[in-house]
């Protein structure tokens, strides 16, 4: 199976403009993401997909493969869809450009189900919420699945509500996705779905359309950088590791 890794990166962000270029220990954040992804031997290649010349320049300076895409894409998944029209593969793995701590072993978990089930179209990762603050943080999508870990819903609220029992683990989304070309084509050719528009969570477009999104639980300590506070957390973790 020919598997391509794509890291969508945009400069404009409502909460943190320019975050792919945010300095972490002397290198832009996108550098750390790219080099973590490169450690996964399942990929035949790894590209950063961007629409911004500043990010392109930083990639070239740091020996990162980069592909320019349209400025009109509303989501990272749309950007992956354009890449799929330029570079053919059997599977596209989307790794968010704001996950500098993402572990290679975690990324591989999004790929493994496709080896086991050739009919599978989409995977996404989730991990147990360990920090109670994350459970009520609206920037962190919470994942609800059925007994087979097929996605039922994602929400920025605390859900499901523990009315009957508090003996429950809440899960948050880890933004690594696996897409077959057919699923990407569906996403790019259809407008935002009803609940997707309300929650502003891309994967809901597939769930609302009836796609089975296979969730895989991982034990991950990754921190998605959505704010300056998140960036400071990442810098502190990296400095401690060094």
Image (cartoon, rainbow, N blue to C red):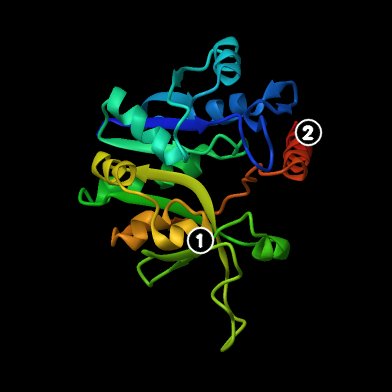
> Left or right: 153 with respect to 139?
left
Picture quadrant where residue 94 is located = top left
14 vs 51, left or right, is: right
What residue appears at the point 43 percent right and 26 percent down from the top-left corner?
70
Element class at badge 2: helix
| Mark sitting on residue 239 | 2
**On-image quarter of the C terminus:** top right
Q: Residues within 10 Å of mark 1 (few under 14, many from 20)?
A: few
Q: Are marks 2 and 1 in contact (CB under 8 Å)?
A: no
Mark 1, residue position: 198
**First-in-chain label (2 vs 1):** 1
Q: Secondary structure at mark 1?
A: helix
**Residue 95 visible within the image:** yes
Q: Residue 72 at x, y = what percent? A: 45, 32
Instruction: Pinpoint residue 148: horizontal percent, then vertical percent.
Output: 35, 68
Task: Please give the label number shown on residue 183.
Answer: none
* Residue shown at the point (63%, 49%) measured from the top left: 221
| Left or right: 111 as drawn, with respect to 53 | left
Depicted 132 relative to depicted 220: above or below? below
Question: For the N terminus, which image quadrant?
Answer: top left
């Amino acid at each position: 199976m020919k598997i391509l890794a794509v890291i969508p990166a945009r400069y404009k962000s409502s909460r943190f403009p320019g975050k792919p270029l945010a300095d972490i220990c002397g290198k832009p954040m996108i550098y750390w993401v790219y080099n973590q992804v490169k450690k996964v031997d399942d990929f035949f290649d790894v590209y950063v997909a961007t629409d911004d010349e500043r990010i392109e320049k930083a990639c070239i300076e740091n020996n990162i493969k980069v592909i320019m895409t349209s400025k009109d894409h509303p989501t990272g998944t749309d950007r992956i869809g354009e890449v799929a029209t330029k570079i053919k593969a059997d599977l596209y793995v989307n790794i968010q450009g704001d996950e500098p701590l993402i572990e290679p072993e975690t990324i591989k978990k999004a790929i493994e189900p496709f080896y086991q089930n050739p009919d599978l179209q989409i995977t996404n990762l989730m991990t147990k919420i360990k920090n109670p603050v994350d459970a009520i943080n609206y920037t962190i999508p919470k994942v609800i699945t059925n007994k087979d870990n097929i996605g039922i819903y994602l929400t920025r609220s605390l859900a499901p509500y523990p009315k009957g029992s508090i003996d429950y683990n809440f899960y948050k989304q880890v933004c690594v996705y696996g897409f077959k070309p057919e699923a990407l084509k569906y996403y790019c050719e259809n407008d935002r779905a009803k609940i997707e528009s309300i929650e502003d969570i891309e994967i809901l477009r597939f769930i609302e359309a009836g796609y089975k999104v296979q969730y895989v639980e991982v034990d991950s300590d990754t921190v998605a950088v959505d704010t300056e506070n998140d960036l400071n957390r990442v810098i502190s973790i990296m400095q401690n590791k060094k």
